[in-house]
Amino acid sequence: MKNDLQTETLRQLLLAQKVQLLEKMKQERGGLGSRADAAMNQLSAAEQSHAQNITERDNVFAMQEHDVAELEAIEQALARIAHGAYGKCLDCDVAIAITRLLAAPSALRCIDCQTAAEKVLGPGAALH
């Protein structure tokens, strides 16, 4: 576990990221129902194509899924802080370097284990 000052600094960083992410999600969903709705309202009927609408919808869903996964990772990191389990690698149980946690405060793994996980699971391993 990091010292109390480092842990509190990282907790504050996570809380700030949470606030920013929630604000981003609110803005993206504010007003019109979705980005796809906004795009459709800006295009004339002749300009709208089924393929465009499907692509825009798929992009919106992907961004929303990523935002939700990121928010969940932040919540889980805050829970690990509250339970005293924060800052230890999920796979090898060694302390995650403070430089890594400052760069990615919701990190679950040390660099070596994260690299290995990404080789098996792909880039999505960062949030799992």
Image (spheres, rainbow, N blue to C red):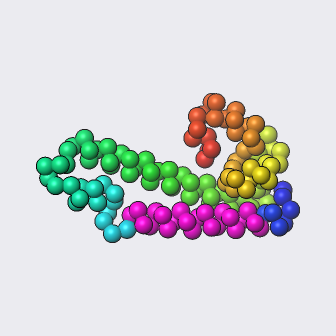
Q: Which residues are magenta?
A: 8-29
Q: Is residue 74 visible in the rendered structure shown here?
A: yes
Q: Residue at x 36, y 45 (%)?
A: 58
Q: Residue at x 83, y 67 (%)?
A: 5
Q: Quadrant of the C terminus?
A: top right
114 on left or right of 46: right
As drawn, 113 above or below 60: above
The picture places residue 6, in percent across and down from the top left corner, at: 81, 63
39 on left or right of 93: left
* Foreground of the two, 77 or 22: 22
The picture places residue 46, in percent across and down from the top left corner, at: 13, 49
Determine the main secondary structure of the stretch shown in magenta: helix
Residue 40: name its quadrant.
bottom left
Residue 17: name its quadrant.
bottom right
User: Furthest residue to the right?
Assistant: 3
As drawn, 117 above or below 78: above
The picture places residue 107, in percent across and down from the top left corner, at: 69, 50
User: Furthest residue to the left?
Assistant: 46
Q: Residue at x 32, y 49 (%)?
A: 57
Q: Is residue 82 visible in the rendered structure shown here?
A: no
Q: Residue at x 34, y 57 (%)?
A: 35
1 on left or right of 41: right
- Magenta stretch: residue 20 in it? yes
* Foreground of the two, 85 or 21: 21
Residue 41: name its quadrant.
bottom left
* Foreground of the two, 31 or 42: 42
The picture places residue 38, in percent across and down from the top left corner, at: 29, 60
